Image (cartoon, rainbow, N blue to C red):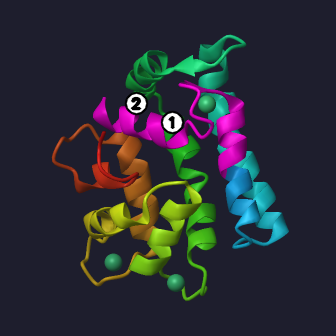
Amino acid sequence: MKKMNTYFMRIDFDGDGKITRNDFESMANRFAESGKLPEEKSKDLFETLTAIWDKFLMNVAGGGGITKEMFIETMKKAVRDPNLKSAVEGPLPLFFHAVDSNSDGFISEEEYGEFFKILGMDPNLAPASFKAIDTNNDGLLSEDEFRVSGTDFFLSEDQNCPTKYFWGPLV
Ligand code: CA
Ligand code: CA
Ligand code: CA
């Protein structure tokens, strides 16, 4: 619940206390505008992010926005849905390439700070998250580490799982 509460705060881009398709579109647009992805990939990211809305959240919203309470309830149920994994995993490789700005195949701590900045988060919060998901402690995030942690964030119900810090400290 704390993770979904945190995620809700991070993706409510316009801060209106509700999640709508617009929040997912804005997230994709921020990445497109950051210029870190070629146009084609930006379009992919837009599609995979809005698919999370279209596949899991649109029905919940019933034409309106989703409040935090509704969102947490939905995700509590969705965690048992076998399709959730592919939906939340889908955007991660695209995020990865957007964040790996020097294209060396790894995300450095500095690049991870950029990721937070694009999401409108305080980049000072990035190092703690970075360390939590750098599973082999080599000071770099591989695509695997990033993808597995980003997926575990939604699927793991283990309170001690360090991937809970993927989207910054829990709020
Ligand atoms: Ca919103
Ligand atoms: Ca890099
Ligand atoms: Ca690593």
Do the residues under discs 1 and 2 have CB atoms within 8 angstroms? yes
Q: Residue furthest left?
A: 160
Q: Is residue 166 above or below residue 140?
A: above
- Residue 146: image x %, image y %? 43, 65
Q: Which mark is residue 84?
A: 1
Q: Quadrant of residue 109?
A: bottom left
Q: Is residue 103 magenta?
A: no
What is the x, y in percent for residue 120?
A: 54, 54
Along the line of sight, which residue is nearer the eye, 138 or 27?
A: 27
Q: Identify the amino acid type marked 2.
A: Val
Between residues 145 and 95, which one lies in front from this camera angle? 95
Query: Which residues, given as a range, are shown in magenta?
Result: 1-27
Residue 135 placement, left or right of 84: left
Q: Is residue 140 visible?
A: yes
Q: Which amino acid type is shown beneath numbered disc 1?
A: Leu
Element type at marker 2?
Answer: loop
- Report the predominant secondary structure element of the magenta stretch: helix
- Local secondary structure at mark 1: helix
- Say whether residue 21 is left or right of residue 97: right
Q: Residues within 10 Å of mark 2 (few under 14, many from 20)?
A: some
Cα gap from disc 1 to disc 2, whole angstroms: 7 Å
The residue at the point 60 percent across, 51 percent down is 90
Along the horizontal axis of the image, is 1 left or right of 12? left
